[in-house]
Image (cartoon, rainbow, N blue to C red):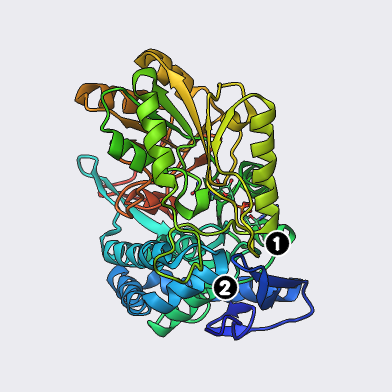
Amino acid sequence: MNTQPTASHFINGAFVEDSSGTEIPVIYPATGEVIATVYAATPAIIEQAIASAKAAQKAWGKLPGTERGRILRRAADIMRDRNHDLSVLETYDTGKPYSETSVADATSGADALEYFGGLAGAITGEHIDLGGDFVYTRREPLGVCAGIGAWNYPTQIACWKGAPALACGNSIIFKPSETTPLCALKVAEILHEAGLPAGLYNVIQGMGPQGAQLITDPRIDKVSLTGSVPTGRKVYAAAAENIRAVTMELGGKSPLVIFDDADVENAVSGIILGNFYSSGQICSNGTRVFVQRGIKGAILARLTERLANAQMGDPLDPDTTFGPMVSAAQREIVEGFIAKGQAEGATLVTGGTRPDKDGFWLTPAIFADVTDDMTIAREEIFGPVVSILDFDTEEEALARANDTIYGLAAGVFTSDLTRAHRMCAGFEAGTTYINTYNLAPVEAPFGGMKLSGVGRENSKAAIEHYSQIKSVYVGMGDVEAPF
Ligand code: NAD
């Protein structure tokens, strides 16, 4: 596959190049080879993107929702038709195995385009009767949105932000992570092939400074970030300067609580999905696994056994089930956490080593005997490392599960129905699971409490975050005035 894009940026319906920006090599994580080169947006490129998004938005916002939606749904169909090629590109961009990308990335992006395309015609205001006079509300677009992406799900993030933004009548400028710049360009191409007018979905490349320049422009009406908490603080503060709307999808250190009465096989599957899918590089991962003492032996034994079945190999081979870390830098961060875990007294049961391969590989790691105060139980690792903590009672598990600055996700495995619901009611997290983990269907709200974020993506809830309400008061009688 030719992984070199036509140009670095996609602006006003066309690829645009400006090689005077900082060079960004795109590295295939499985081998460490440079597979493409793009250039960070210069101020002139950012200006072009904002100007075109601003100019295109007005007419788009006035179209009936069903017309906007039709284009999004057509784009969803094209994405599904090209799932193979898009999945291969996602694998090159991120290193995630094709066995994952072919079912979780372009497919998830297409789901978002289809869902919000279908919803676009149903975005309405309401009528408020005042016994004569009345008010009606109009749900209007915000204007020009800026989307800033992380590197773990480049296609999905580009669609999860683009689809609701466009459905609501906005335009969007998306800046992918500098680590994975390729996939969003394909999303832009497909949307335009589906009939999206020029200027409504633009992609510009760059690092933090380019992101910062984009979001601080007074013509940007909304900022949606998927990234880490430290970046979230900066982006939120910058948006606050102009009193702009934000969606913040940030990091997590989510708890997964497994009671003695849980089904061992299903609970272990939950641990695997919540810690080792995408080599552990998922924001909602349940990295603090609290296991009730009576089931600890069985869970640890079965988890260790099943991890040995992870197939590390060429990510493009459909039999490979475990890929490399996204970058050399991310692997070093994760190795630093593993060293800290050992130094602070946790038991490294297996993994955490570099296999003898090129690229940024790291074997999946299990830590047991982890305590709440250890660094690996407190900080987001964002790699294939699970921490197993023991507990005795439900109250204790819930209190310890919530003892974190984060609140993205939480899960519980138990066969006690009422306990499961009690735990979910008690979790301080935006996305919770009973007897499963880490599924994120477009129909359900997704997002975090506490430091994990503001706002929700997906579902009807996202419409609230990409539109605003205008009240129209209608006087039906004479106007009374005091003098
Ligand atoms: P990051 O915070 O380093 O970068 C995120 C994006 O922000 C990148 O595109 C980066 O270029 C940009 N950026 C950096 N500084 C900026 C600034 N000052 N102004 C504007 N943009 C700026 O995150 P990452 O390393 O790419 O991704 C990993 C993090 O993302 C993890 O913490 C993970 O939990 C989080 N994440 C969250 C979700 C979610 O939905 N909650 C999903 C995926 C990843």
Q: What residue type is labelled 2?
A: Leu
- Residue 36 x/y as whole percent: 65, 78
Give the camera-side residue of 253 and 393: 393
Asked which quadrant contains residue 431, the reply is top left
Q: What residue type is labelled 1?
A: Met
Disc 2 secondary structure class = loop
Image mark for residue 58: none
195 relative to 161, above or below: below
Q: Is residue 329 visible to the viewer in this orientation of the structure? A: yes
Asked which quadrant contains residue 100, the reply is bottom left
Residue position marked by numbered label 2 in the rendering: 182
190 relative to 411, above or below: below
Q: Quadrant of the C terminus?
A: top left
Between circles 2 and 1, the one closer to the viewer is 2
Disc 1 secondary structure class = loop
Residue position marked by numbered label 1 in the rendering: 207
- Residue 284 x/y as whole percent: 46, 43
Earlier along the polypeptide chain: callout 2 or callout 1? 2
Q: In this view, does 430 lie to the left or right of 2?
A: left
Give the Cα distance between marks 2 and 1: 14 Å
- Residue 228 x/y as whole percent: 61, 46
Q: Is residue 41 visible to the viewer in this orientation of the structure? A: no
Give the camera-side residue of 217 and 226: 226
- The CB of the residue at mark 1 lies under 8 Å from ligand 1: yes
